[in-house]
Image: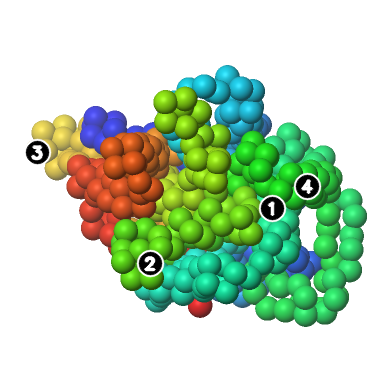
């Protein structure tokens, strides 16, 4: 009778519940201290350098997924709020499949190689698949890196309201400096993008090496840090007597990053393949270290930035006499890997003017800003996957608790196996009260739907193999491609530069809303908040 009424959605969870009970018995004695962050202090560094990829206790000593999984914490919030000795669950953790790491970076490298090989030369619309592929690869890598980071910054709702105004002020200031005052900002801009590009490339170059094996993740060189210059990633407070532990992957990444930034600077940022490689790494790094704290703040910021993009492309010429956005983007002294480039098609019937900018371009803002929403949707998919695992464990526990409690309750009842008692319908043939299966099933369903019982689970979730699909991430990434194609189509029809966010933001937000309504999760998506609470501003 008990087996007959097990719900399909909870029937698989028995092994998970047993594993969880067994894991509690085997938990290390120093687990609470490790979870509370009282171990040796670690230093927060830029980009992926801040990610401590050495093995450390993040739950019971059990399998962390497949052999090609790499676990790292998605949030330090729980450790930050936990005192030593508190009996609380470890923070939720995720792992990016190493095979998926290699495939992602391999796809990015392949797109860059095809673009620089000349295979697309002479094709009028070659820039369309090229830009689209680069943008998708950069967003994919950045979203997954951000999900598996030890710590990251989140943009608060208040900051999302200020964003369009801050960016407008910065853009107009750049326009005044370049077009009105005719200042030469090349030294400052080159220095800025040299550092930014080197750090971004270093972090991305280290990622495949980290996935290649434990050797690349082990600290081998320790460097002292002046007091106050290091920030503890758990407490977020300045540290004293801190040390940086450099891994082989990080050291190789630094060499590659500095070499790439130097080569790009020597080429005056006009080697479009090298420029695009660094630009894609910058987008990936940006999405991995910064994200929105909630869906509401993300949607608010994207709508504000849509208005910002539309105004400075469509209306700025009527206000100041020039298209401010295009003037800054194409200015010779404001040059760097802040845009994706592809050589213009040489049309003999309609040749490009010698003074015209020789490349088609896509600004990184048109990649990174929608990418913030897409990355947030991956985190939403991941949070739902974690909840489903914990819900199944809670349901299995509740199911077995009903049998255990009633077994103890009826054990003292005499003659419950007598023919008269059995025929009366008071007890099942196995000695339980009639309807035990339905009561256990109802308890399992109630526990499955009880959010208060499903916050903790034992082992990291492998991404993407452990998510059982990435409905919102995949849908929003596909919507990005559609929106970008719409922007290109508008550019071809009007023969004028287009604010891509005008097409990207409604498309991506609209598809997310459509998927949420179709799955009956509109309220849940609207109320979703990221676990990471370190807010900017």
Measured Cα–Cα span from mark 4 to mark 2:
34 Å
Against 252, is 199 above or below? below
Q: Is residue 39 visible?
A: no
Q: Work out whether mark 4 precedes mark 2 in sequence or the reverse, and give the earlier one.
A: 4
Q: Residue at x 35, y 64 (%)?
A: 317
Q: Is residue 469 visible?
A: yes
Measured Cα–Cα span from mark 4 to mark 3:
92 Å
Residue 17 locus on image (x, y percent): 46, 44
Q: Circles 2 and 3: CB distance less than 8 Å? A: no
In the image, 140 versus 220, the foreground residue is: 140
Helix, strand or loop under label 4: helix
In the image, 239 versus 448, the foreground residue is: 239
Helix, strand or loop under label 1: helix
Q: Circles 4 and 3: CB distance less than 8 Å? A: no
On residue 321, the disc is 2
Residue 273 locus on image (x, y percent): 64, 36
Q: Nearer the viewer, mark 4 or mark 2?
A: 2
Residue 253 locus on image (x, y percent): 78, 46
On residue 424, the disc is 3
Q: Work out whether mark 1 precedes mark 2 in sequence or the reverse, and give the earlier one.
A: 1
On residue 197, the disc is 1
Measured Cα–Cα span from mark 1 to mark 2:
33 Å
In the image: residue 404, left or right of residue 286: left
Badge 4: few (under 14), some or many (20 or more) residues near its Cα, within 10 Å?
few
């Amino acid at each position: 009778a008990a087996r007959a009424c097990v719900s399909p959605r909870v029937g698989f969870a028995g092994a998970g519940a047993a594993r969880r009970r067994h894991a509690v018995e085997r938990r290390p004695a120093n687990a609470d201290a490790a979870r509370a962050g009282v171990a040796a202090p670690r230093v927060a560094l830029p980009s992926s350098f801040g990610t401590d990829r050495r093995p450390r206790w993040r739950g019971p000593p059990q399998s962390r997924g497949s052999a090609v999984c790499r676990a790292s914490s998605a949030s330090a919030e729980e450790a930050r709020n936990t005192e030593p000795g508190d009996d609380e669950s470890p923070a939720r953790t995720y792992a990016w499949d190493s095979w998926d790491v290699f495939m992602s970076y391999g796809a990015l490298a392949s797109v860059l190689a095809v673009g620089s090989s000349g295979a697309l030369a002479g094709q009028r619309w070659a820039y369309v698949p090229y830009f689209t592929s680069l943008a998708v690869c950069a967003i994919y890598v950045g979203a997954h890196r951000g999900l598996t980071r030890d710590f990251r910054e989140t943009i608060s709702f208040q900051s999302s309201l200020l964003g369009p105004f801050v960016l407008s002020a910065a853009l107009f200031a750049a326009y005044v400096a370049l077009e009105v005052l005719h200042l030469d900002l090349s030294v400052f801009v080159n220095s800025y993008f040299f550092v930014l590009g080197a750090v971004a490339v270093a972090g991305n170059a280290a990622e495949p090496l980290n996935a290649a094996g434990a050797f690349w993740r082990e600290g081998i060189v320790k460097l002292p840090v002046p007091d106050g210059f290091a920030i503890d990633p758990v407490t977020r407070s300045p540290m004293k007597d801190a040390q940086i532990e450099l891994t082989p992957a990080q050291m190789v990444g630094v060499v590659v990053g500095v070499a790439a930034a130097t080569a790009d600077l020597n080429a005056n940022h006009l080697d479009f393949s090298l420029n695009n490689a660094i630009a894609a790494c910058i987008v990936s790094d940006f999405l991995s270290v910064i994200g929105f704290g909630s869906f509401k703040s993300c949607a608010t910021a994207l709508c504000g930035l849509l208005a910002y993009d539309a105004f400075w492309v469509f209306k700025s010429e009527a206000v100041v006499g020039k298209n401010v956005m295009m003037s800054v983007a194409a200015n010779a002294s404001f040059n760097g890997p802040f845009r994706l480039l592809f050589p213009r098609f040489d049309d003999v019937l309609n040749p490009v003017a010698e003074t015209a900018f020789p490349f088609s371009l896509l600004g990184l803002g048109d990649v990174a800003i929608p990418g913030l929403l897409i990355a947030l949707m991956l985190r939403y998919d991941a949070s739902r996957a974690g909840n489903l695992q914990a819900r199944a464990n809670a349901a299995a526990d509740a199911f077995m608790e009903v049998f255990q409690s009633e077994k103890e309750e009826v054990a003292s009842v005499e003659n419950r196996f007598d023919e008269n008692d059995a025929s009366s319908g008071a007890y099942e043939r196995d000695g339980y009260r009639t309807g035990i299966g339905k009561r256990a099933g109802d308890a399992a369903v109630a526990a499955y739907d009880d959010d208060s019982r499903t916050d903790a689970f034992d082992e990291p979730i492998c991404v993407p193999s452990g998510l059982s699909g990435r409905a919102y991430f995949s849908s929003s990434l596909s919507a990005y491609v559609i929106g970008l194609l719409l922007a290109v189509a508008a550019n071809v029809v009007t023969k004028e530069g287009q604010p891509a966010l005008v097409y990207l933001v409604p498309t991506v937000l609209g598809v997310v809303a459509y998927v949420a309504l179709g799955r009956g999760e509109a309220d849940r998506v609207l109320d979703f908040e990221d676990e990471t609470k370190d807010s900017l501003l």
